[in-house]
Amino acid sequence: MMGARLARLRRVPGLPVAGIFGPAATVIYLLFIGLPVLALLIRAAQHGNFLTGLVSDLALTALRLSLITSGISMGIILLVGTPFAYLLARNTSWILRIVDSLIELPIVLPPVVAGVAMLMAFGRQGVLGPVLETLGISLPFTTGAVVFAQIFVAAPFYIRSAKLGFQSVARDYEDISQTLGISPWGTFWRLTVPLAAPSLLTGFALAWARSLSEFGATIMFAGNLMGKTQTMPLAIMTAMESSLDSALALSVLLLAGSVTILIGLGLATRPKWQNRL
Amino acid sequence: MPVSIGWLKCRVGGFSLEADWHIEEGEVLVLFGPSGAGKTTTLRAIAGLVRPEEGRVELGGRVVYDSAGHISVPVHRRQVGYLTQQYHLFPHLNVAGNIAYGLPDRRQPDARGTVERLAKMLRLEGLEDRYAWQLSGGQQQRVALARALATNPQLLLLDEPFASLDNELRRELRRELRAMLVDSPIPVILVTHDREEALALGDSVQVIDGGRIVDQGEPLRVLGQPGRGRVARLAGVENLLTMTVESRNPQDGTMICIGGSVKLEVPLDAAPSAQSDGPEQRENITVGIRSSDIILASEEPRGTSARNRLPGTVTTVDPRPPGYEVNLDCGIPLKAQVTGAAMSEMGIRPGQNIWAVFKASSCFLVQEEMTSPSA
């Protein structure tokens, strides 16, 4: 016990790089991130018209549209992404391994490219354009297109995290559960999901944050139509041209949402049995 | 009458496995063998977690698997209790939650009664609110057992239930489990590679190697003085000596064998050549002696009925709980097992001259050639 404490006292914190460069780099980085965030808050406070900016038509409409579209997007991501992630976690066939390695493509792909790609697929001149047209469906520049864009860029965050979560649940647990008389379906809900819950929540939060902040793919594929496709990020850009108040108010709102998600993640995803699987 | 019978053929990768069993009410069948022999796969196939190629599994008079009849009851309807080596208590549930997990009405007062009854029976009272990581290995094992028993299994499958425990705890828990199993009518199949465990817990034993049953029967007979070389090695018979038959003495039921510079008196073999023995007939045989059957003496023992008395020297002494293993050179190498008290009393140390003493009946003949297990 004593020996362990002494050893800890004498311990040098890593390689020399931690001695000088480490603290310096930390300060520089914190300032780099912290200053703009602080500046945003300061300016928003100085303008004082935070509330009027927030209740402006532009802001309210964008806020409502963002919540509705990202809500729909997240519902679809959960519904499709969860079984898909489970399959990826449990199956090791070579086909799925290839699929697995491609899952994260939308994360590294520039969102604008995603928007162009979706236009090429679902646009009037797109590959599926004629088919959609005969069905009487026109997707680009509709609220549906916003949802498409959000799902495209946000889903990988949830699927990746959910897959890791399911992988962390040893199959033996599922086996035991079934020998105890619980059906495979029941086992999934009563055992696998609760045990993977921290990862599922993390993935959900990250995907939600990503879909709320979606900009590039949306403006390409859905355009910037107020009340129809103008989500909060697009509204901020539009507002910057006319009313700084609304832009600041929306920005602060999105910042607050991000911080809330971050704190929520920290609280919700650390149950006491974590790391004891 | 919860009786379980069945047979299985499985193929996992390039490994093929054949198993069959017949367990009476309250009986414990031990599957004994090295790791990789197919013991766990057998358990998993019975539970329905592995699909066999062919076979038939009957649990308590109910057919849960029959390849001929295309019957395969899913795992959750088989009513099989399965305990893994690491117990796998559900980490997000406390002890009570784990025990109640399989109860259909786990929020009803009845379920609470079941949990209380099992917690009492398995001495888990007061631990109901703890989580798996707050329990000792032994407690975890008892929770896993309670969780399995709560669902009224027709058969209990125990996969190396003591493997992750230290020696002392293992002995204590083995006693406990024995006591619990004796009271219970549920038949048990227990997998182990520990001979002591097989002897302590088994009503019958199957020795499994390479996916086949190489011997089966009453544990003391099968593992105490194993008659086949493969089984003897698996059962860890410490002394296996290659010798030649010198002469047979049917009146005493013994024979004299020679190996190196040593003559031993061993039980007469059942070979047909027992009648037509002659000094010129030199057959190779393998003689097994358990190290615990060898007595050490610091002086030549006189007036003893033990037929084999060999002078020799101590080469090395190794700790082998609960005692020590003394390696001897008596013209042939021999291993003897002694207690710590005997060690210090006799002052056993390498280089010391010593006598090894053992009865003719402590020696047993080991068949080296591969023969199929006789019925």
Image (spheres, coloured by chain):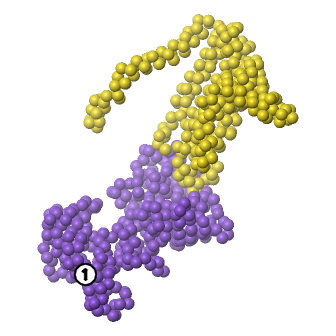
Chain colours: A yellow, B purple
Looking at the rendered structure, the number of numbered marks drawn on it comes to 1
Residue at 63% in and 53% down: A183
Q: Is residue B120 visible?
A: no
Residue at 40% in and 18% down: A24
Q: Quadrant of residue B67?
A: bottom right
Q: Identify the amino acid type marked 1.
A: Ile
Residue at 61% in and 15% down: A252
The answer to which of B202 and B1 lies nearer the viewer is B202
Q: Quadrant of residue B333?
A: bottom left
**Horizontally, is A86 left or right of A172 in the view?**
right
Question: Whole-percent x and y of residue A16?
Answer: 34, 25
Secondary structure, mark 1, is strand
Residue at 46% in and 52% down: B86
Note whether A21 is above or below B151 in the view shown.
above
- Quarter of the image with the N terminus of chain A is top left
The answer to which of B157 and B148 lies nearer the viewer is B157
**Horizontally, is B208 left or right of B367 in the view?**
right
Query: What crowding class fits label 1: few (fewer than 14 Cα within 10 Å), some (14-19), or many (20 or more)?
Result: some
Give the residue pinned by disc 1: B258
Question: Whole-percent x and y of residue A190?
Answer: 60, 46
The answer to which of B242 and B179 lies nearer the viewer is B242
Q: Chain of mark 1?
A: B
The answer to which of A163 and A78 lies nearer the viewer is A163
Q: Is residue A223 visible?
A: yes
Question: Whole-percent x and y of residue B64?
Answer: 62, 65
